[in-house]
Image (cartoon, helix red, strand yellow):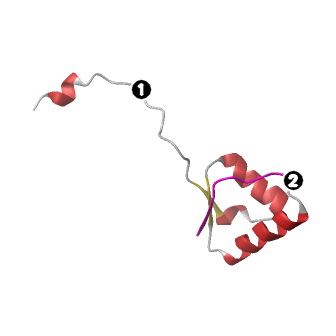
Amino acid sequence: MVTFHSVLPEPNNLRKNVVKFIGEKSAGIIVMADVAVDILNKDYGISRSKIHVIRHGIPDTPLKASEPLKKN
């Protein structure tokens, strides 16, 4: 498995060949955003089935009162 933290669109030939090589040799690719899946597929020719999204950061959840959690 390989993790790409950044995926650049419209790559030059060198970058395109390197990323394609990595994609061919890896069992899977992890990216941080859905747009990276589109770029890797469209600009680098990597199959979507090989790409998995694991978003960075934390989910946006509503703030809840902490008092009920403090009761034991």
Q: Quadrant of the C terminus?
A: top left
Q: Nearer the viewer, residue 37 or 14?
A: 14
Residue type at numbered disc 1:
Pro
Residue type at numbered disc 2:
Glu
Q: Is residue 52 magenta?
A: no
| Magenta extent | 1-10
Q: Residue furthest left?
A: 72
Image x and y of residue 6, in percent: 69, 52
Q: Residue furthest bottom?
A: 25
Q: Which residue is at 55% across, 53% downward? A: 54
Mark 2 crowd level (few <14, some 14–19, many ≥20, 10 Å Cα) = few
Q: How many marks?
A: 2
Image x and y of residue 70, in percent: 16, 29
Q: Quadrant of the N terminus?
A: bottom right
The residue beneath circle 2 is 10
Q: Could you tell which of marks 1 and 2 lies nearer the N-terminus?
A: 2
Q: Is residue 19 left or right of residue 67?
A: right
Question: Mark 1 touching mark 2, by CB under 8 A?
Answer: no
Q: Label for residue 62?
A: 1
Q: Residue furthest right?
A: 13
Residue at disc 1, secondary structure: loop
Image x and y of residue 67, in percent: 20, 23
Residue 68: quarter of image: top left
User: Viewer-nearest of labels 1 and 2?
Assistant: 2
Residue at disc 2, secondary structure: loop
Between the C-alphas of marks 1 and 2, the distance is 38 Å
Q: Which residue is at 48% across, 32% downward? A: 60
Image height of 50 relative to 39, above or below:
below
Q: Label for residue 18?
A: none
Magenta stretch mostly in which secondary structure? Answer: loop
Mark 1 crowd level (few <14, some 14–19, many ≥20, 10 Å Cα) = few
Q: Is residue 9 magenta?
A: yes
